[in-house]
Amino acid sequence: MPVRRSRIVPTEARGELAASLEALRRELDLPASFPPEVQEEAERAAASVPTDPGAADLADLRGIEFLTIDPAGSTDLDQALHLERTPTGAILHYAIADVPAYVEAGGALDAEARRRAQTIYAPDGRIPLHPPVLSEDATSLLPDQDRRAYVWRFVLDEGARPVETTLTRAIMRSRAQWAYAEAQEAIDLGTAPPALLAMPWFGAERDARESERGGASLNLPETRVIAEGDGYRLESRDGVPLEEWNAHVSLLTGMAAAEIMLAGGIGILRTMPQADPDDVAEFRAQTIALGIPWRFDVRYGEYLRDLPRTPAARAVREYAGGLFRGAGYVAFDGEAPEDPRQAAIGAPYAHTTAPLRRLVDRWSLVVCEALANGRTVPEWVRASLPEVPALMAAGSQRAGRMDAGAIDRVEAAVLQGREGEIFDGVVLSVRGDGARVQLRRPPVEAKVSGLGDAVPGVEVRLRLEQASIADGTVRFAEASS
């Protein structure tokens, strides 16, 4: 798991950074807290919604040894899994937090969640979709707690293909909370519980199924802002294999949800159009120019998955990202969308596994559970379904602006005071007279003008000319050799 870290933001820059991040929140009109009536409604729900199987008339699945896998320190736990190998494949149970039980349609809590649309993660604290009394306690699938959940059960064949799918509202209990790094280490050492030890098989088979259906994963390194003491630093990491294997559990569930919705004639899908043939041809030409040609006899996803960890391959992945465009949500009640597929996945797909952090998943879960069990979809779902795509689009835009703006400001804070220094970097892509460059250290990505003749994948030397924390502006120029 290659990890590149920056130095921590210098002490003298922290006050200015805090003020800049606060200004960014105000600019995006992000709420600082929940209105009193929303908080009160959440507290009432947390105290009154039953979690006893008999009182709640729910299936008792506490005998299944669920576990959660999340980034270290997570408290808003949407999902828990149990994977058991069988002579013919496996049985996968996937529990998703039962947020609908706690959010009354048409209430103050519902209205506030629609306004927020999703949890936003910022360096100076997250802006949650739901009050913490729910998102970090009553509905979070914390270990050793009885929790309400929508539990998907998949009977899988030896190729990890679902041959039987059911969805049950139940009471469950997680046995352990794992962080990705410690879980990966336990898998590698062979000391992990059986559910984790089965994940490499599951991940490999789902990779193969993804390739068969024409799906693809970019797996770009992730740059994150890490809080450390009273300051921040940047970290770029490739992740551990378990993260991709665990993502396949969510993808499998999202594809199953889409199938249920399409069969039932009502739902909301996450869609993405197929790449334009001209864009595909241009991408193929770029792979040739970068010395890693995409052969016509190799599937797109397989090509991306087998790319090495080199500067040229990183540039290829950046160009591939241009083919993953146009994602959105499509709601339907009656006639299905003309093209229901999510092109990057290679199949119809629905967001349904993160209801604590994403608004749309609450609708998906309620629709799927009703359809899977032969019941009528609730009227509040039908009436409000057309509104959800626009709510999610607005929420995603806010989250994207917050993420990009926060990273820009922390990058500037890390670099402030180093004006005039020379940094080594790799050209990721070229547009017009400028280029996007990834610095070796610190893990900063910058747009640099005057590099229109640069070649993607090659190394360049840059001189830092400006680092402004107030607006996150970082300006580099090519250094003379």
Image: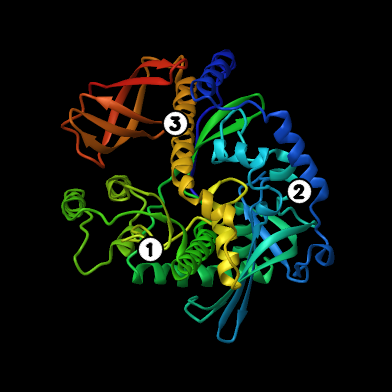
**Foreground of the two, 9 or 324:** 324
Identify the residue shown where x is 45% and y is 66%. 265
Asked if one can make out residue 120 in the rendered structure from this viewpoint, the answer is: no
Label 2 environment density (alpha carbons within 10 Å; few <14, some 14–19, many ≥20): many
From this view, report whether residue 180 is shown above or below residue 119.
Answer: below
Residue 205, percent from left and from top: 46, 72
From this view, report whether residue 76 is shown above or below residue 160.
Answer: above
Find numbered disc 1 in the image and state the secondary structure of the residue it sits on.
loop
From this view, report whether residue 166 is shown above or below residue 471.
Answer: below
Q: Choose the circle earlier in sequence order: 1 or 3.
A: 1
Find numbered disc 3 in the image and state the secondary structure of the residue it sits on.
helix
**Amino acid type shown at disc 3:** Arg
Image quadrant holding the C terminus, namely top left
**Amino acid type shown at disc 2:** Ala
Residue 35, percent from left and from top: 68, 29
Residue 167 is left or right of residue 435, and the answer is: right
Label 1 to label 3: alpha-carbon separation: 34 Å
Of the residues tagged 2 and 3, which is closer to the observer? 2
Which residue has dot 2 on it?
138
Residue 29, percent from left and from top: 53, 24
Find numbered disc 2 in the image and state the secondary structure of the residue it sits on.
helix
Which residue has dot 1 on it?
335
Q: How many numbered discs sit on the rendered protein?
A: 3
In the picture, residue 36 is in which quadrant?
top right
Q: Choose the circle earlier in sequence order: 2 or 3.
A: 2
Which residue has dot 3 on it?
401
Residue 57, percent from left and from top: 78, 67
Label 2 to label 1: alpha-carbon separation: 37 Å
Disc 1 and disc 3 in contact, CB within 8 angstroms: no
Disc 2 and disc 1 in contact, CB within 8 angstroms: no
Name of the residue lying farthest toward the bottom: 87
Q: Which mark is residue 186?
A: none
